Image (cartoon, grey):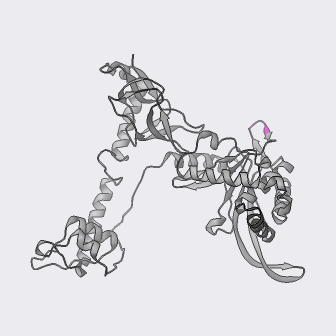
């Protein structure tokens, strides 16, 4: 008897999924545990295994297509079995299938035919730009035309090569792809575009959820911000000593995570969540670490960070970053945060404010370490300063509470020997 496989809910925030790739096609025999499809959620692209045995009779969402959770993904049954009645009777499935096909036709690329994501209007615009650039760079032959192959034209536009400076090796002086590849004296022309031109791409599932969750956070949680400067001289020396003496390489971000974890244990009101009719004060410390990926932002969680050593934190964060870049994070990797850190210091950002990551009550935005003049013992000397900004949900955390937490954090970062007991390295 035919059975329906529905779009799975692969994360707590997943509303709809995109089928990135099918590993089976209609007519294939499928066993339980076989890899069926790669499904893109709001967090990552995840492998979806079949939990049924049988023949794949119907695919409800084509590659690149979007479908809400619990709608038809596929139908399994016996080879040759009639499933028309099953599809017809399931009215929600029929509506979603029509909607998915319409979206696919208008915005989603056809992976089978290798079409690009450009709309018809964008293609027409591109052709106009190509023609205009060819008019600028082309020197016509005796017949008034530049002899050049279509592929050579495309390469010339991409590489900004002046075709009039190239002698063609093809029939009748025709410029070919080989001429472009062998040309070393390219005349660079301007990228000037004399028509309005743009490209539109569908919003990814990840970006949709980021927009939704952060929009809700920003406009429902009353944010206020506390900024503090921290002298990182001792932290710089401590990091170097750990590498030289112990042989363990830790980053400043690892030190920050450890210091935040220790500070949160001393200030549990910051390690909290607003739940509408109650406030949850967490005794455990699970720190979310914001990681930038191609489509947006992921926040894997270092669980029980206060009880982990610096080397454990370093290894865990490095593994999370790799998994995030490869879209291999699992739901358990990004759930359960009680506090979040967003560090943009490696990008040269001096200071910034971050939007609170629900359900947390606070998020710490970390800027870069800058060498600036500082006054110490009445003298002006060079110092290494890092600025941090704590975003707080005023429904949960007051100004004094946030300030006391930052002072504890500052003390730990400026005196990292407190963090560096043997059991903590």
Pick the front one: 131 or 303: 303
Drawn side of residue 253 relative to residue 234, left or right: left
Q: Residue at x 90, y 79 (%)?
A: 377
> Residue 18 magenta-drawn?
no
Q: Is residue 93 above or below residue 242?
A: above
The quadrant where residue 128 appears: bottom left
Furthest residue toward right = 377
Give the image location of residue 292, x and y in percent: 58, 56
The quadrant where residue 389 appears: bottom right
Drawn side of residue 258 relative to residue 179, left or right: right
Give the image location of residue 308, x and y in percent: 77, 49
Q: Residue at x 58, y 52 (%)?
A: 322
Q: Can residue 150 be seen from the camera position used here?
A: yes
Pick the front one: 404 or 327: 327
Q: Can residue 289 be seen from the camera position used here?
A: no
Drawn side of residue 4 relative to residue 157, left or right: right
Q: Which span of residues is magenta-colored?
A: 274-279
């Amino acid at each position: 008897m035919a059975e329906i496989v529905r779009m799975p809910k692969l994360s707590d925030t997943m509303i709809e999924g995109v089928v990135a790739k099918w590993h089976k096609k209609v007519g294939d025999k499928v066993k339980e545990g076989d890899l069926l499809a790669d499904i893109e959620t709001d967090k990552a692209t995840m492998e979806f295994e079949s939990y049924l045995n049988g023949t794949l009779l119907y695919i409800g969402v084509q590659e690149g297509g979007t479908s809400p959770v619990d709608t038809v993904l596929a139908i399994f049954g016996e080879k040759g079995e009639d499933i028309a009645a099953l599809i017809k009777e399931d009215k929600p499935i029929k509506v979603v299938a029509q909607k998915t096909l319409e979206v696919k036709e208008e915005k989603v690329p056809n992976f089978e035919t290798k079409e690009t994501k450009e709309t018809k209007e964008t293609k027409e615009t591109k052709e106009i730009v190509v023609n205009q650039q060819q008019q600028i760079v082309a020197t016509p032959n005796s017949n008034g035309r530049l002899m050049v192959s279509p592929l050579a034209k495309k390469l010339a536009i991409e590489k900004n090569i002046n075709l009039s400076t190239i002698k063609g090796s093809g029939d009748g002086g025709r410029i070919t792809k080989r001429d472009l590849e062998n040309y070393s004296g390219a005349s660079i022309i301007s990228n000037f575009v004399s028509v309005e031109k743009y490209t539109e791409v569908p919003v990814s599932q990840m970006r949709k959820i980021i927009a939704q969750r952060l929009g809700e956070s920003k406009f429902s949680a009353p944010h206020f911000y506390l900024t503090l400067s921290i002298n990182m001289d001792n932290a710089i020396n401590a990091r170097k000593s750990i590498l030289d003496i112990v042989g363990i390489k830790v980053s400043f971000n690892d030190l920050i995570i450890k210091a935040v974890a220790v500070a949160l244990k001393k200030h549990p009101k910051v390690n909290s969540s607003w739940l509408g009719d109650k406030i949850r004060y967490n005794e455990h410390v699970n720190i979310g670490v914001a990681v930038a990926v191609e489509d947006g932002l992921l926040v894997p969680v270092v669980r029980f960070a206060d009880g982990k050593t610096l080397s454990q934190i370093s290894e865990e964060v490095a593994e999370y970053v790799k998994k995030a870049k490869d879209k291999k994070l699992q739901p358990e990797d990004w759930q359960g945060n009680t506090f979040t850190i967003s560090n943009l210091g490696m990008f040269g950002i001096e200071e910034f404010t971050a939007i609170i990551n629900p359900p947390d009550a606070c998020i710490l935005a970390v800027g870069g370490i800058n060498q600036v003049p500082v006054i110490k013992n009445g003298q002006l000397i060079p110092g290494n300063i890092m600025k941090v900004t704590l975003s707080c949900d005023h429904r949960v955390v007051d100004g004094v509470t946030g300030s006391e937490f930052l002072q504890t954090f500052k003390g730990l970062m400026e005196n990292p020997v407190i963090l560096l007991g043997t059991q903590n390295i």
